[in-house]
């Protein structure tokens, strides 16, 4: 699929002259008359899919809204991403903390194992509290900014994003910590 085949706003100018009828008919015939074997058709389809996936991968790295997957598209999702990326969240450090706690629990010292158990509890409670506060704040901000748009699933989308380490998030964060979204 090329850029010219992307849907455009109905009031936007076309950007090219209307082709003459004879030219349009000959183009239609040439597309309809191309005979492809099943192998050729499958190969062409694979190449198109590979190109689309490459465009999508680049969009996830650059934040290009046009080629993002459907779950990441739209102003509501963009705001939710920026809201999460502009703040520090305890949940993004869960994996490194879990590794440290697991190492502590493997040591054959009873006191260290008790400390590890207590740390598990503290980490989980902190993540839950941080998620509740983030969810409430985000819901309020979304209601103020996007009163007429569909906000369904945006809070869950943002909370799942907090669980990922900042470096590994896709689409890549477009705002720095401390910036206002």
Image: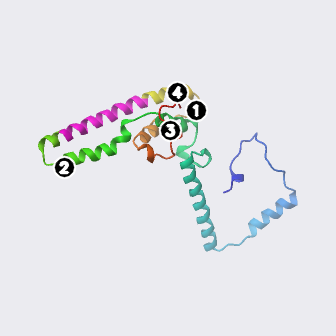
1 or 3: tag closer to the N-terminus: 3
Which residue lies under the disc numbered 2?
A: 106
Residues in magenta?
A: 115-135
Q: Residue placed at 73% from the left, 70% from the top?
A: 34
Q: CA distance from mark 1 to mark 4?
A: 9 Å
Q: Which mark is residue 143?
A: 4
4 or 2: tag closer to the N-terminus: 2
4 or 3: tag closer to the N-terminus: 3
User: Regarding mark 1 in the picture, which secondary structure is present there?
Assistant: loop
Q: Residue placed at 28% from the left, 47% from the top?
A: 99
Q: Which mark is residue 81?
A: 3
Quick check: marks 3 and 2 in contact, CB under 8 Å? Answer: no
Mark 1 is surrounded, within 10 Å at the Cα level, by few (under 14), some (14 to 19) or many (20 or more) other residues, namely few
In the image, residue 49 above or below residue 13: below
Q: CA distance from mark 1 to mark 2?
A: 50 Å
Which residue lies under the disc numbered 1?
A: 149
1 or 4: tag closer to the N-terminus: 4
Location of the N terminus by quadrant is: bottom right
1 or 2: tag closer to the N-terminus: 2
Tell me where residue 54 sits by quadrant: bottom right
Viewer-side residue, 128 vs 179: 179
Q: CA distance from mark 4 to mark 3?
A: 16 Å
Quick check: marks 4 and 3 in contact, CB under 8 Å? Answer: no
- Report the mark closest to the observer, 4 or 3: 3
- Report the mark closest to the observer, 1 or 3: 3
Location of residue 177 in the rendering, given as x and y in whole percent from the top left corner = 47, 35
Q: CA distance from mark 1 to mark 3?
A: 16 Å
Q: CA distance from mark 4 to mark 2?
A: 47 Å
Q: Residue placed at 68% from the left, 50% from the top?
A: 6
Q: Residue placed at 42% from the left, 38% from the top?
A: 159
44 within the magenta span: no
């Amino acid at each position: 699929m090329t850029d010219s085949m992307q849907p455009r706003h109905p009031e936007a100018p076309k950007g090219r002259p209307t082709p003459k009828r004879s030219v349009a008919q000959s183009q239609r015939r040439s597309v309809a008359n191309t005979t492809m074997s099943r192998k050729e058709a499958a190969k062409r389809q694979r190449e198109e899919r590979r190109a689309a996936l490459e465009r999508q991968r680049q969009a996830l790295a650059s934040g290009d809204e046009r080629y993002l997957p459907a779950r990441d598209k739209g102003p509501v999702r963009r705001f939710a991403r920026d809201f999460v990326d502009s703040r520090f969240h305890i949940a993004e450090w869960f994996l490194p903390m879990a590794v440290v706690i697991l190492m502590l629990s493997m040591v054959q010292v009873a006191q260290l194992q008790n400390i590890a158990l207590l740390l598990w509890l503290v980490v989980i409670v902190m993540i839950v509290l941080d998620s509740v506060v983030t969810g409430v704040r985000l819901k309020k901000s979304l209601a103020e900014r996007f009163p007429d748009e569909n906000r369904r699933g945006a809070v869950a989308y943002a909370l799942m994003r907090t669980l990922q380490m900042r470096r590994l998030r896709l689409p890549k964060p477009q705002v720095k910590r401390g910036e206002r979204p």
